[in-house]
Amino acid sequence: MAQRVLGIPLVAVGALVVTVLVALMLERTVLGRSIAAVGQNRRAAQLAGLKVERTRLMAYVICAGLAGLTGALIAGFSGGNSLDQGQEYLLMTIAVVVIGGTAVAGGRPSVPGIWGAAMFMFLLVALLNAVGAGPGLRMLLTGVIIIAVIVVASARPAR
């Protein structure tokens, strides 16, 4: 976890590579477009002839693989693992997806939006840690941010 390439942490390089691969998969492959179609409207995707259940299965398999990779990275970073080790990241993950512009009920993801939201949440947590806020306050603020973004997004007129 401490390896560096040209002074850049290898984990950061790996994250960038995985992000680019996922973005390319979502934008340029049949599976990616199928995932977007099923996420926007499952019934319409089914009527269009897409194999909805197969697409959902593939999306879950991809998510499980990325979650496993993330778990391995977290275990490597902390030097061990436990059953509840990733629990603190659960609400943060939801917040990043919502703030990044992906609709909670399904829809088109925005990879740059996800990166921006991740940076925002990282800076927010760093700020709260700097002022001595406890984990309860961090989770409360994360929940308030999620609710605020959902309210603001639902108040916008539909296109």
Image: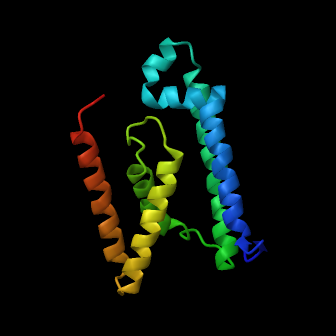
Viewer-nearest residue: 52 or 23: 23
Does residue 77 appear left or right of residue 141 in this picture?
right
- Please state if 90 lies on the left or on the right of 29 as rendered: left
Question: On screen, 59 above or below 54?
Answer: below
- Which residue shows up at 27% across the image and 30% down it? 158
Q: Position of residue 122 (x, y in %)?
A: 47, 69
Residue 100 makes an appearance in the image: yes
Q: Is residue 52 above or below residue 23?
A: above
Most extreme residue toward the front is 6
Count of marks overlaid on the render: 0
Q: Is residue 72 visible?
A: no
Name the residue at 51% across, 55% down: 115
Figure quadrant of residue 50: top right
Q: Is residue 65 above or below residue 126?
A: above
Work out whether 63 lies above or below 122: above
The quadrant of the picture occupied by the C terminus is top left
Using residue 110 as the reference point, say whether residue 33 is left or right of it.
Answer: right
Tell me residue 70's x, y (percent): 63, 60
- Please state the horizontal and vertical placement of residue 59, each as a whole percent of the image: 59, 37
Q: Position of residue 137 (x, y in %)?
A: 31, 75
Q: Colour scheme used in the picture? A: rainbow
Identify the residue shown where x is 51% and y is 49%.
112
Q: Residue furthest left?
A: 155
| Quadrant in which the N terminus appears | bottom right
Which residue is nearer to you in this view: 121 or 104?
Answer: 121
